[in-house]
Amino acid sequence: MRRVRGTSTRRSRRRTSGQARAARGGRAALSQPSAASLAVRLALPLSIVSVQALTLAPFDAGPDDTPAATHFSRDLPGPSLASSTSACSPAWTRSRATSRTFTRSHSQSNNATFLTECSFAVSHDRLVQYITDVEPFEPDWASLRSIDLSGKKADSVVRMKEFLPKLDELSYLTGIPKTLRTLLVASNRLTSLTSFQHLANLERLDLIDNHLDSVHQLSSLRHLRELKLDGNQLDSLDGLGGLDSLVKLSLRGNALVDVNLGQTTWCSRRSRLETLRLSRNKLVNVDGAERLVSLTTLDLDHNHLATFAPRRPLSRLRVLRLGNNPLSELDVAFAPKLRTLYVDSARLGNLVGTDQMRKLENLSVRDQSGDALTVAMAHVRDVKRLYLSGNPLPSSFPSDKFYNLTYLELAMCQLESLPADFAAVVPNVRVLNLDYNFIQDISPLSGLVRLTKLSLVGARIAKARPLAVVLATLTELESFDMRMNPFTLAFYPPLVPPSGSLLPSHTEHRILHPDDLPTALSASTLADPATHSSAWQALDVKFRRALPDAWYRRRAAYRAVVMQAAPTLERLDGVDCAKDRPRLARTVDKLARRTTAVVERR
């Protein structure tokens, strides 16, 4: 037993002296265990990451053009790295998962090389940590094909291919497999010097919100089908014109001024470009659009275009957006198969060529700042959704029947009355917005049996009883809003438009932005109606509780009358009816008993 203990003591002393010598020589602790041994020793599942904020960590190449010597220590025991990590490794890298051991040759003993090696190792450690964070329940990293490091602010994905050999969807450049097809690196620090040549198989690339002022380096990506370059600093299409495999291209929010699409290969017969988004640039001229033979969606919103007139028809164009441009006249005859036309906030006095658009379904010409807008309504009577808010309408309302119309928006149109045959003109309308007009009588709405949502915010209706008569005929009504009318002003807290404009937010966002995800609806374009509604409802709860008894009873009586007239209502004046009905029933019952008692006393 003594001999055994002596042997153990000597071995312990050797280990201690060896560690001391390593520390004196400046040897960093930096070994790299395999993903499998990491999972076994830490009881952590293997996982993988995808990169969004990446800056390549520098490293020195060894004699064989490989990073400075590192090796894996798969079987290193020890509960902590505190005794083996180098001073160059930050505290957060000292986990139970890995015991790093870094060896340096005599030729690499200078301080610069040593710091470089430390930087390389730290980046590697972070990558392991990010992978574990993103995919904590993935046991097999080797089989993973996609990865998302969004928001991780990773510095590097060097040697990612060692962890993820089958990866084909990621978000960064150096150290990833050449077979990669999808690369998402939005909101990073990429520059125009970043190379993409080794990623020739890329089909989808997202470079939104980087610092790119040139994209010449993308010219080698011949298989690219979808490219997003929004929010950069590009002032030309150089480097993109030869990408004839592109199907979707987005360049929103750049610095483009003059674009000639005719000088690109997108105009060839084999071109497949279907979606082109150039909104929020500084465009004053767009030439050659008529040569994009496959184009179905063209977005030119928020530019400085005074005219847009392609020389030949765009026979496949389905969606055209020209809002927030100083257009005074627009002839849309060049797009005979157009389904959606969006020209809000322009200066249009005349919309020409609508007789050629036999398949138009969605027309939005809201808030024109020029002369009185003229639209031949007879030519657009087959539309399904019509947005005319913010334009003074003539007193003579169109007499043509709009049988297909399901959504009609006429907010802020200076309407003082509705035609007597209004219900016959739009018999199938489901959503009707008449906010901020001067309407006093809504009897022309009687008989709109398919109407599900009616908004009359800020009108001039003074009595509730005639209102109930009309509501009784709207047998499918689910939402009704009468706030800010003369007789409801004292019932609710003030209603402040969420976007700073009295124009309603587009509820049919997917119609006008068919390729956008819901998350694309940002505060810079449209306020979030849902968020605003929730905030107002919370304010209304406090307001209702603070009402004097007399006004509380008046509000309750009004709501009870409306709900009784329209039993299908789910939402009244921005407040859900489900919880309101029992309370209102009790309130009305109390009022009835009090009234009966007063009558009996007399």
Image: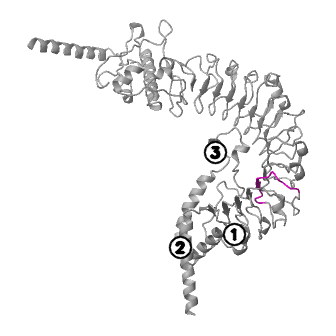
What amino acid is found at the position of numbered circle 2 in the picture? Answer: Arg
Question: What is the magenta segment's predominant secondary structure?
Answer: loop
Position of residue 465 in the picture relative to residue 76 (left or right): right
Numbered circle sitting on residue 485: 1
For the point 75% across and 33% down, the residue is 276
Q: Residue 463 sits in which quadrant? A: bottom right
Q: Is residue 25 left or right of residue 188?
A: left
Q: Quadrant of the N terminus?
A: top left
Question: Which of the image's four quarters has the C terminus?
Answer: bottom right
Crowd tier of the residue under label 2, counting other residues whose Cα lies within 10 Å: few below 14, some 14–19, many 20 or above: few
Name the secondary structure under disc 1. loop
Determine crowd level at label 1: few under 14, some 14-19, many 20+ residues with C-alpha closer than 10 A: some
- The answer to which of 1 and 56 lies nearer the viewer is 1
Q: Secondary structure at mark 2?
A: helix
Name the image colouring. one colour
Q: Which residues are magenta?
A: 400-412
Q: Is residue 559 visible?
A: yes
Evaluate whether residue 57 shows in this view.
no
- What's the CA distance linking mark 3 and mark 2? 43 Å
Residue 586: numbered disc: 2
Spatial separation of the CA atoms under disc 1 and disc 2: 26 Å
Instruction: Work out whether mark 1 precedes mark 2 in sequence or the reverse, and give the earlier one.
Output: 1
